[in-house]
Image (tube, coloured by chain):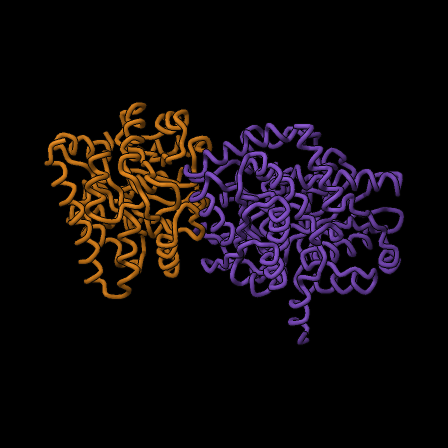
Amino acid sequence: MSTMSEPAREPIDFSSYPDASGHFGPYGGCFVPETLMTAIRELTEAYARYRLDAEFLAEFDNDCTQFVGRPSPLYLARRWTEKVGGARIYLKREDLNHTGAHKINNALGQALLAKRMGKRRVIAETGAGQHGVATATVAARLGMECVVYMGAEDIQRQSPNVFRMRLLGAEVVPVTSGTRTLKDALNEAMRDWVTNVDETFYIIGTVAGPHPYPMMVRDFQSIIGRETRHQILEQEGRLPDALVACVGGGSNAIGLFHPFLFDSEVQLHGVEAGGYGIDTGQHAAPLCAGKPGVLHGNRTYLMEDEWGQIMGTHSISAGLDYPGVGPEHAWLKDIKRAVYTSVTDDEAMAGFHELTRTEGIIPALETAHALFYAGQLAREMGPGRSIVVNLSGRGDKDLQTVANREGITL
Amino acid sequence: MSRIEARFKALRASRRKALIPYVTAGDPHPGFTVPLLHGLVDAGADIVEIGVPFSDPIGDGPVIQMACERALAHHIGLDDVLAMVRDFRSRDADTPVVLMGYMNPIEVMGHRRFADEAAAAGVDGVLTVDMPPEEMGDFSDCLAAAGLDPIFLIAPTTTEERIRLICDNARGFVYYVSLKGVTGADTMDVDTVAGRVDSIHAVTGLPVGVGFGISSPEMAAKMSRASDAVIVGSVLVRRIAEHGGDDESTLRDVTGLLRAMREAMDTEAEVPA
């Protein structure tokens, strides 16, 4: 595990990012084939209209309460805190949302937007399957046709979620091109969108992709941070000293971080997938070990080879197995408002077991990366301070992976 | 005058339409590309379009995507592609060369260095599928300084306002995507395409090429009547894929198809309107 921490230097008006064309400093933007540009424009205009529309926001809030089960609790992990012997660790329980992860917040928001735009068909890419399940769920509820693209390798390691999506009426399309994981699923979903652009709304699951997706997904996920802010003030009487979240594309992290960007005293820690270790090259940590480039519609940090080909990534968790990262994270890294670190597969497994045994909560393997790091950070910070970890998803979907890894046949 | 502009001017003078084949560099292996390019020119290509392989070609269908994967299995980088262009230029000083690909390999090389090295190698035009005019920034200046023509796609869904924006930023020609979808899809309506090409001609003096989904000599002929240039890619690349291995017969087959397209287009040009 590696850490670094430096405070932000000068006040920045975070609310003015991204700019009108979707840029976070040098990152973000809208790098898409012309075949998609009109659809992107249509989406940008629709979202600009509804993001401040009282009726739209009221419907989103109401569904968050009645369908998703929000607000999710902010839970003080008392026994784990005592065991670690450092800062008080709070868990933002996104695992308790309907469908078991934070992904539903965004899928719901985009599906409601799709409905207002008159689209009858939604498509999505998925890695771990959480975003696919969330999309299939809202599509079933709204009576929309749903197609989910998923890497053939991920279909193998996340079979319960595949079954769940099919039960919900979604068509799950295996993607066998390239590395057969999340990035290739995203490629296929883009191709579907280009082809069926009139009737189709593409629900991207993370804060990546072309503008307006990084902004829109952030806005829908920011409900996590807004609730957290309110809850921590109620429980602690002051803001937390640090926020910790895992970062694949970065949607759960930005959702937690964003409402705290102006609070320079609150440290923001993003945890990428270190796989077998950064020095092995077998990881999914573009912010820690990548370079800026252009992929999937935005400029951001990428894992690429010397000729700009996107590299295969490795992580124990399918949801973090992505060679890019949301452009706002790239920018927050460069301006040093957030710090990004990595946790290996083995360390994440340790975090997984630690939380399960100490708090009776089985976390997703994605989340386990953040948990391991949070334990270290809490010890480092010492008593009297507080940390909030985004418990972004529950671990039911990972039981097979954990069992396989430990040589157990279920 | 750029090589592309000169070529279109000459074609207009002889009342012919341009035939532009696309092949992916390094597909199925690096040694095949330059002989193939010469063969395509001999078969009647007026401009050649060379695909720069990329790992994540979101604008392309499975045919071009597989071509990229075959080329990448040989670790074909942008520098290898430029070396192929240099090699091609050593025997062909006249046929314009357009590179078609995605932005990231160029980002890694650097905008200026890419533009300078591409121009020095003998490249004439650059089409980066995922780089719209709005994001061009300094890349536009780099291409202009090196004398390279930026080529852009116009889609069936592109609004008139955007057609103007694109044509203001383009040089050489513009590339009308004749159907909704990715490269290699197979439905198309000639009259609709003709209407769209007319509306592009109404806003620009640049030649308009039509591509995506042109798969037979008959269709190439029809499309040539409706436009200034016919671009064929997937149908050629599919032939390469189906052959697998035997260079000589692959070359014969691919250039034979292109020659049939050339003949159909030239015959069409002689039919009175």
Q: Residue at x 84, y 47 (%)?
A: A386
Q: Nearer the viewer, residue A152 or A326?
A: A152
- Foreground of the two, A352 or A97: A97
Residue A215 vertical placement versus A387 (above, below): above
Is residue A10 visible to us here? yes
Q: Look at the image and give the colour of chain B.
A: orange
- Determine the residue positioned at 66% across, 39% down: A220
Q: Is residue A393 left or right of residue B82?
A: right
Chain shaded purple: A
Where is residue B74, by image quadrant? bottom left
The answer to whether residue A299 shows anywhere in this view is no
Give percent across and percent down for residue B31: 27, 59
Quarter in which the N terminus of chain A is drawn: bottom right
Write the residue at 35% across / 39% down: B127
Is residue B80 found left or right of A337 in the rendered image?
A: left
Frontmost residue, B37 versus A35: A35
Picture quarter with the C terminus of chain A: bottom right
Q: Residue furthest front?
A: A143
Residue A327's image quarter? top right
Counting every numbered tag in the picture gives 0
Give the x, y percent position of residue A390. Answer: 74, 49
Horizontal side, residue A373 vs residue B59: left or right: right
Which quarter of the picture shows residue A79?
bottom right
* Residue A253: image location, x then y, percent: 68, 46
Please give left or right for residue A37 compared with residue B96 in the image. right
Residue B8: % across, % down: 20, 33
Give whichever of A245, A397 is nearer the camera: A397
In the depicted structure, whether residue A233 falls above or below residue A276: above
